[in-house]
Image: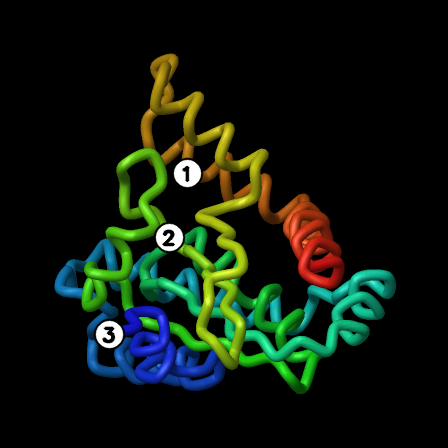
Amino acid sequence: MNLLKDKSQIGIDYLNYHKTIEELLAEGKTSGTNHSEDYIHYTKMNLQRMNRYLKTVDINEDLSALIQSIDKPLIFLVLAEAWCGDVAQNLPTIHKMVDLNPNWQMRIVWRDENLDLMNQYLTNGGISIPKVIVLDATSFEELTVWGPRPAEVQAMVMDYKKDQKGIPYMEFVKEVHLWYAKDKGQRLQGEWKAIFDSLKGS
């Protein structure tokens, strides 16, 4: 059994992921098993964020050229959930990058329905998402892994977990989303440029 191959085959592409979230919200639901008012609210906010990123974020010219110069067929296998803010902040930009290369495809699976895969890609023992597993599209070999967030945001999260300094969790979440709003996907693109440079050289 090749777990990465099996999950890639059941995954959905970004446009179907987006459509599924809209359909879930229309039914008063989100992904996973927690359909609380809070989680529905998070999902609505995330749909707005995703729509905004699709309209406003451009992949810079150097990164676009690098992506289009890589002839290796790749699969970007993503663990995600509709209610997760980090997924909404990062996935549209990654989708735009993947979409620039006709030999690449994104396949998204729901974290909570695929814990057998998630448990192979923990972050400090936690099931943080998104996790993006880049695979060779022919052999389904894992080439690299990214996630769950840009390094600077991850450092913010780790610092908060060590010392909350009296800051309520929802206030901290606002700080994180403000960071994303100011950055506009630039740090994310920088991290992926390093990944693609490595893949091209391998």
Whole-number angstrom distance, CA of label 1 to CA of label 3? 39 Å
- How many marks the image carries: the answer is 3
Residue density around tag 3, few if under 14, some if 14–19, many if 20 or more, within 10 Å: few
Residue 184's spot in the image, x, y percent? 68, 52
Q: Which residue is mark 3?
A: 1
Residue 39's spot in the image, x, y percent? 24, 58
Q: Image quadrant of residue 61?
A: bottom right
Secondary structure of the residue carrying tag 2 is loop
Screen quadrant of the N terminus: bottom left
| Foreground pick, 9 / 109 | 9
Secondary structure of the residue carrying tag 1 is helix
Left or right, 70 with respect to 134, comes to: right
Q: Which residue is mark 2?
A: 129
**Of the residues shown, which amino acid type is indicated by label 2?**
Ile
180 lies above or below 164: below
| Foreground pick, 96 / 89 | 96
